[in-house]
Image (cartoon, helix red, strand yellow):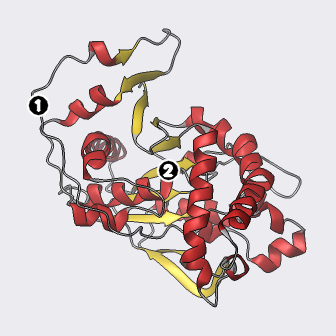
Amino acid sequence: MVPLPPEPAPADAPGTAPSRTSPQPLGDHLTRLAPASPYVDLDRAAWSRLSASTPLPLTDADVERLRGLGDPIDLAEVDAVYRPLSRLLNLYVSATAGLHRATSTFLHEEPPRTPYVIGVAGSVAVGKSTTARVLREMMARWPDTPHVELVTTDGFLYPNAELQRRGIMDRKGFPESYDRRALIRFLSKIKAGHSEVRAPVYSHVVYDIVPGEEVVVRRPEVLIVEGLNVLQPARPSSVDESTVAVSDFFDFSIYVDARTRNVRQWYVERFLQLRRTAFSRPESYFRRYADLSDAEATAKALSIWESINAPNLEQNVLPTRGRATLVLTKGSDHSVQRVRLRKL
């Protein structure tokens, strides 16, 4: 089952950012990993201090607008986690622009700068959509990246009719349910510097591709690509011998992580909330679930989780965690507790 629709949650009381203190040594907060580890591991306190001089560009109202259903992110979380991440990404984008200039000088040409592409992966209900939306807003506030676009891979799912023809309607969200060739073509054009690239649109309400609708991406400075399986390695098959992976087009990748038992609980809670919101709409594919009792809805959500989402997580999504540039590890309350950054 593809992730249920990420809708804005009801507004809570405005949050407040914690007061900033002078920088302190990070040594006491770093986990001493074995020398063979490819990551630097920081706890929340150490990570949040890494951008003490970086302004926080978002407000309570911005965060309320951006957070997904069931994700209680607030301004304090944005300040502690996403302000440092925004600063790090800004440094990476700037460094990549420098490499682009060096390459252009070497080749004696002036090719247009191509978008910096960031992949965001993770389980259903883990909060990756909120992560992608917050990053888009924060990176767009940096003066050298004012044009930031966000595309989800849901638009590259095969239409329901094609999934039914292939007999994989109950495996929606698994790697084989995506039009991988179309997604690779899309990213190839982005990295080739095309002035305009189009992607299909997916509706979580009707649970299908919307005929005739497209997302148009017009040469952004940064493109964020969010989806379950965006860190999957290439899997050549009898019908597709390509050895190119979606992640080959990423300049930076993020995996949003949490214990499976917590994600399962978040999924059930979100299902119950959707029963009272999106599911109740007449055109909703899930309209039949709107009138379930709490007990019936909980049982249905657990059934879907155990039969579809858990196997996809265990078989396809979780194994890609080690391929990410950065891992955000959440606690049971959805707050990020640890950050692991791949060494260069």
Outermost residue, left direction?
A: 22
Between the C-alphas of marks 2 and 1, the distance is 30 Å
Find residue 216 and report its horizontal and vertical position in percent.
46, 77
Find residue 183 and report its horizontal and vertical position in percent.
62, 63
* Residue 84 in sight from this viewpoint: no
Find residue 318 and report its horizontal and vertical position in percent.
65, 39
Q: Amino acid at mark 2?
A: Val
Task: Determine crowd level at label 2: few under 14, some 14-19, many 20+ residues with C-alpha closer than 10 A.
Answer: many
- Indicate the quadrant where residue 307 lies: bottom right
Find residue 114 and report its horizontal and vertical position in percent.
39, 57
- Indicate the quadrant where residue 184 lies: bottom right
- Indicate the quadrant where residue 308 lies: bottom right
Is 144 or 98 nearer to us in this picture? 144
**SS state under label 2:** strand
Q: Quadrant of the C terminus?
A: top left
Is 200 or 123 nearer to us in this picture? 123
Q: In this figure, which residue is indicated by the disc labeled 2?
A: 120
Q: Quadrant of the N terminus?
A: bottom right
Q: In this figure, which residue is indicated by the disc labeled 1?
A: 21
* Residue 85 in sight from this viewpoint: yes
Q: Looking at the image, which residue is at 9% across and 27% down? A: 22
Identify whether 289 is placed above or below 84.
Answer: below
Sequence-wise, the earlier of marks 2 and 1 is 1
Task: Determine crowd level at label 1: few under 14, some 14-19, many 20+ residues with C-alpha closer than 10 A.
Answer: few
Q: Nearer the viewer, mark 2 or mark 1?
A: 1
**SS state under label 1:** loop
